[in-house]
Amino acid sequence: MANQTSSQTVRSVCPFDCPDTCGLSITLEQGKVTSITGDKDHPVTKGAICNKVRQLPDRLYHPERLLYPMRRTGPKGTLSFERISWEEAYRELTERMRSMIDHHGAEAILPYSFYGNMGVLNAEGMDRRFFHRLGASRLDRAICNNAGAAGYRYTMGGSIGIDPEDTVHTKLFIIWGCNLVSTNMHQTMLATEARKNGAYIVHIDVHRNRTSAWADRFIHVRPGSDAALALGIMHVLIRDGLVDSGFLREYAIGYEELAAEAAGYTPERVSGITGVPASEIEELARLYGTASPSFIRIGNGLQHHDNGGMAIRAISCLPALTGQWNVRGGGAMKGNGWYLRLNTDRLERPDLMPDPAVRSINMNQLGDALLEADPPVRMLFVYNSNPAVVAPDQNRVREGLLRSDLYTVVHDLFLTDSCKYADLVLPAASHFENTDLYTSYWHLYVQLQEPVIETAGECKSNFTLFKELALRLGFEPEVFYMTEEQMINEALDSRMNPLLEGISFEALRKNGGRMKAGGGKLPPLAERIPTPSGKIELYSQAMLESGYPPVPVHTNLLEPDRYPFWLTSGPNHSFINSTFANQEKLKKLEKRPLLHMHEEDAAKLDLEQGEHIKIRNDRGEIEMNVSIGTDVLPGVLVTQGLWWDDADKGYQAVNALTPQRLSDMGGGAVFFSNRVEVVKTGTFPNKA
Ligand SMILES: Nc1nc2c(c(=O)[nH]1)N[C@H]1C(S)=C(S)[C@@H](COP(=O)(O)OP(=O)(O)OC[C@H]3O[C@@H](n4cnc5c(=O)[nH]c(N)nc54)[C@H](O)[C@@H]3O)O[C@H]1N2
Ligand SMILES: Nc1nc2c(c(=O)[nH]1)N[C@H]1C(S)=C(S)[C@@H](COP(=O)(O)OP(=O)(O)OC[C@H]3O[C@@H](n4cnc5c(=O)[nH]c(N)nc54)[C@H](O)[C@@H]3O)O[C@H]1N2
Ligand code: SF4
Ligand SMILES: [Mo]
């Protein structure tokens, strides 16, 4: 803990769900954080951080920060609460849990969490252990990257990409379905460095956004058409003899089968599916077939679709065709989590589950689960997440949250929209108040975070909350009476992952809080392809056995065409998901939620720039202002940011419109395979 009297600067780690996992430099005056900048000594993030996190002191000392537990006093949805003590909160919770288990079984209890804080102990440590031991329903945490991870895994065996530090050598960057400038800014910095040595940057997206403006070339595709584009590129590579046969023979299987499929994807046919002119597909393929090193950064956007798993599966085959995996700075990356995988059995203790066959509920279908699950969910325990805003089909979610026989607990730093429906609200400590371990899903460093400030008010970390609850319920002290240090060492137990050898709590402390996996060196390619065959699988027997085509194919999105537009609603620059959406300075930068529409569509609907409109479908209706231009193709709409409800400005969060359907693989969310219509409200000038 920092010295309380003097001014000093200490190291920390950014806790947010962002690939960069930056090293931070915190200035403290009298024990209070006064400024946050980047830690110049961090080998990858090198002293640069985003504006969001520079504003973090406002969040830490925000007047609306939750500081003590509260119990609901009025109807759900009205934000009427009274202060209670932790003693009362724990008594109420443990009594409820015991009685729930006696009457309905522990399966009636459902945890709901994601990565509001990426700290291993606080996001997938003590909490998981607790709910496993309790016997609660399991939560399939599939909201973010599951479809793409599954698709990538079929080709490469796991989340293995290249070391981003090597991309300073790259000559061709393809940024595919990723809003890099906003969502992975340090990859942008590395690519900009490579550009000084002649690198060329291509951005493939449905939205001409900040990343397109920064890139050298923008390829505008229709939503859900990426597998076809990848197959079209393969078609040209194969037709024109631009494949690396030597590499394919040594490191891949299934080239012939893939080539047979790609033969059907002529540039003309692919142009019809993607909207990209055939000449541009030819040009892109030739560029990709001749540049080296070439690197594809695969984002999360294109996999939030009905066919998202297969899209990533298709793209992930490309670098094998050109033999780029063996060139420094060449290859691809969707995520790098496999290199830093922890000993989850020791960390999460699934062995504690009284019934390993207990049901699992997909977090993308929370609405249906709350309204239809049989036996019903009777207690929902939310932490590290804001489901009333981030989960799809939000009207169903909120209808479920309003059930009078559902007991909801929300542990957070703020009164989020989810707290509106809570019976019990518990105050969460910020990560600066905790000890925790951070692994990036992009770079290869493990980082240790130790407390830099004292705990605010009566806040408790997730770690402390679940540990204390476990001990009050009489669970085994040898499992739950743990220090953070002990649990971090259990997680880092390298028996499952030799790349973690030598990394421990003590070693991290000695090394200034961060260490690189594998001592900084990844094993050679042949030793790190964890597919069943040990080779890159262009043809996948495992896919065939799971009912998928064994080679990549294009399929259409599934949303029925009752409504004319496809709506993509991704994250924005100044928030992280719905985090920061209650911070005035950052809200001001984003101004207001906007709906981007093509000028031809606007003309047909007789809309003027900035006009206030309704967007609706069978699931819901929201309002915002239209931004007319050519940033999206005709028939496509884009809005950015997971804003909270704002009744004054006539805005409800965008997930009122999105479906609960699951993607083709991994049970992923399909936020962007969403059809809507747009109607005039007759309100003009701007209501917002
Ligand atoms: N500033 C900021 N940074 C963040 C976040 C944030 O909210 N704000 N969130 C974090 C999290 S949790 C995640 S998962 C990542 C997400 O960050 P990214 O991986 O960048 O994913 P998205 O921003 O969801 O989508 C990326 C792009 O895909 C495009 N897209 C949508 N559909 C398609 C399609 O069918 N084809 C193609 N080619 N493109 C398509 C969208 O227009 C968008 O520009 O960012 C993390 N970092
Ligand atoms: N329409 C649409 N919806 C989307 C997406 C999209 O692109 N479009 N993106 C999806 C994706 S990729 C993701 S990852 C999800 C993200 O969804 P969530 O993981 O729910 O992310 P946030 O909205 O950031 O909410 C995190 C909450 O955790 C709280 N929190 C932070 N630290 C702690 C802590 O230490 N303890 C506790 N108890 N709470 C803490 C924060 O205050 C915040 O309220 O959203 C998904 N929803
Ligand atoms: S949100 Fe991302 S870019 Fe910003 S400081 Fe955190 S890790 Fe770095
Ligand atoms: Mo995410």
Image (spheres, grey):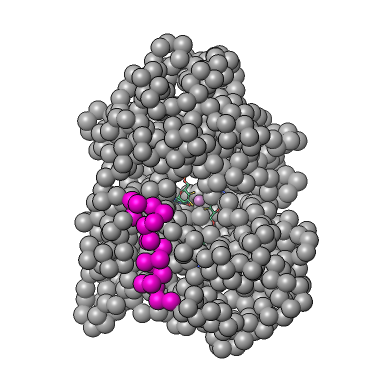
**Position of the C terminus by quadrant:** bottom right
Q: Is residue 161 placed above or below 133 in the rendered structure? A: above
User: How many numbered marks have been drawn onto this rendered protein structure?
Assistant: 0
Q: Is residue 475 above or below residue 677?
A: below
Is 216 or 532 nearer to us in this picture? 532
The magenta span reads: 482-500
**Does residue 356 appear anywhere in the picture?**
yes
Horizontal and vertical percent for residue 203? 42, 32
Could you tell me residue 72's position as x and y percent? Answer: 66, 79
Q: Which of the two residues, 575 or 268, is positioned nearer the viewer here?
A: 268
Does the stretch in magenta take in 487?
A: yes
Residue lying farthest top? 240
**Quarter holding residue 419:** bottom right
**Identity of the residue drawn at 67% across and 57% down:** 361
Compared across the picture, whether 306 is left or right of 512 comes to right
Q: Residue at x 25, y 28 (%)?
A: 198
The reply, left or right, for residue 672 in relation to residue 492 is: right
Quarter residue 383 falls in: bottom right
Q: Position of residue 404 (x, y in %)?
A: 76, 72
Q: Quadrant of residue 431?
A: bottom left
**Which residue is rendered at x = 44% and y = 40% of the image?**
530
| Residue 399 can be seen, yes or no | no
Q: Nearer the viewer, residue 94 or 280?
A: 94
Magenta region includes residue 492: yes
Instruction: Give x and y (percent) for residue 624.
Output: 61, 49
Residue at the image position 72 percent from the left and 80 percent from the top: 99
Q: Quadrant of the N terminus?
A: bottom left
